[in-house]
Image (tube, rainbow, N blue to C red):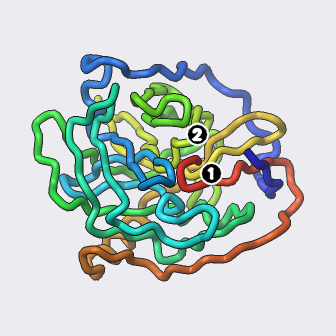
Amino acid sequence: MRLFTIALCALCALPAAAQESPLVAMLTGDASRGWEAVGRLNLGDRGFCTGALIAPDQVLTAAHCLFDKETGARLEVDSMQFLAGWRNGRAIAYRGVNRAVEHPDYIFSGADDLGRVAYDLALLQLDQPIQLPSVVPFDTDARPVKGDEVGVVSYAQDRADAPSLQEVCHVLGRQPGILVLSCTVDFGSSGAPIFAIRDGVARVVSVVSAKAEVDGRPVALGTALEEPLAELRDVMATTAPGKHGGVARVRVLSGGAPGGAKFVRPDAHIP
């Protein structure tokens, strides 16, 4: 794993972390009940990301998951498969993808570009909707504020066969379009839904874009939804099946801005 120096000047002095809950693997049907709309997004032989249903036929994930981490080329949609509720070698539903769109302002970059995190959002349309009583798509909500409790459900490189839940982590800070979170993420967690629970209902408020360090302290970076998600839906509406939407911009950058943080570069199957 390579580390990149980035500027997070507004976060050089993060508040002390509140009590966080541990990351717990959901190995049984009872443990994962209510989270079945989170699934593993397989990317051919390029690895996997995490995604979540926000409509019967739409999966929300991170934009960088759609790109080959070495060449910068977009992955073909027919190489993608969404496995809803994947656990112990089985999924509740298996679906292919017939179109995929990234935010039009997202630029896939091979360098430590914090600006891309604000647009690291993608929407996939499945080849068939998932209409099962046990798989209920999540609503979305406005991004939380600093100090709010959130949670995350994700897969990762060392826990690829079952989702894990961190019920309580916190928003440590915000920059335009970006949340800085105390949530535990690792390779494979890219695109994982960040939830806020209000009135007993879990709603997606962000997706995992990357992991980082601030003064040696691990943090997660999440992409805010709000306007970017509305723009994604507009792009989806004008993209033909079997195609990618967006502008397909790839920029390979070098170097980095000095600052108090380290950025772990997101790969196609890692955050």
Mark 2: amino acid: Val
Q: Considering depth in this image, is 152 or 252 the residue closer to the camera?
A: 252
Quarter residue 14 falls in: top right
User: Which residue lies at the image location 47% right of the left edge and 53% below the top edge?
Assistant: 45
Q: Is residue 47 above or below residue 241?
A: above
User: Which residue lies at the image location 26% right of the left edge and 80% below the top edge?
Assistant: 240
Quarter residue 137 falls in: top left
Image coordinates for residue 20, horizontal then vertical, percent: 58, 22
| In the displayed structure image, the side of residue 191 where residue 58 appears, left or right | left
Image coordinates for residue 265, horizontal then vertical, percent: 69, 53
Q: Say whether marks 2 and 1 touch (CB < 8 Å).
A: yes
Image coordinates for residue 131, horizontal then vertical, percent: 11, 46
Q: Name the residue under label 2.
A: 171
Residue 199 visible in the snapshot: no
| In the displayed structure image, the side of residue 134 where residue 194 appears, left or right | right
| In the displayed structure image, the side of residue 119 where residue 89 appears, left or right | left
Q: Considering depth in this image, is 77 or 62 the residue closer to the camera?
A: 77
Residue 25 visible in the snapshot: yes
Q: Mark 1 points at which residue?
A: 174
Mark 1: amino acid: Arg
Task: Quote the CA–CA distance across marks 2 and 1.
Answer: 8 Å
Which residue extends farthest right?
258
**Element class at badge 2:** strand
